[in-house]
Image (spheres, grey):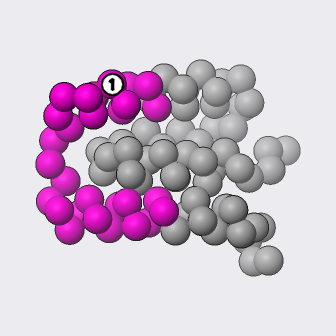
Amino acid sequence: MPLGLTPLRSLWLGLALAGAGLALIAGVPPPRGGDWAGIAALAVWCLVETMVRRNWGALATLPALALGLGCALPLYLFLRSRRVA
């Protein structure tokens, strides 16, 4: 498979792109209420697990949080699911 895309990695990438597209179409409103808790939880999880696994590329998830969890969470799972040397 090109670029090491397994069916599951393809799904994560597709969901991340769909989440980004929907956020951009909707105009990316600022997070409200419970959205902040989800964003904070994903950010902390990403930072901690990135340090443990030394998968520094997964930090690309943090800027994606500006587009919301619908983009950032599948992107993180896509980046996390690759082989780390």
Magenta-span inclusion, residue 75: no
Pick the quarter of the image with the C terminus: top right
Q: Does residue 70 sit above or below 17 in this rendering?
A: above
Left or right placement of residue 40 versus residue 16 in this view: left
Left or right placement of residue 36 versus residue 60 in this view: left
35, 45: nearer the viewer:
35
Left or right placement of residue 13 versus residue 65 in this view: right
Q: Position of residue 4 (x, y in %)?
A: 77, 67
Residue span colored magenta: 15-42
| Residue drawn where x is 32% and y is 67% of the image | 21
Q: Position of residue 6 (x, y in %)?
A: 75, 67
Left or right placement of residue 74 versus residue 64 in this view: right
Task: Note whether residue 64 is visible.
Answer: no
The residue beneath circle 1 is 37
Quarter of the image for residue 2 reads bottom right
Q: Does residue 3 sit above or below 34 in this rendering?
A: below
Task: Note whether residue 18 is visible.
Answer: yes
Label 1: which secondary element: helix
Q: How many marks?
A: 1
| Residue drawn where x is 26% and y is 29% of the image | 34
Main SS of the magenta segment? helix
Magenta-span inclusion, residue 41: yes
Circle 1: is it few (<14), some (14-19), or many (20+) Cα within 10 Å? Answer: few
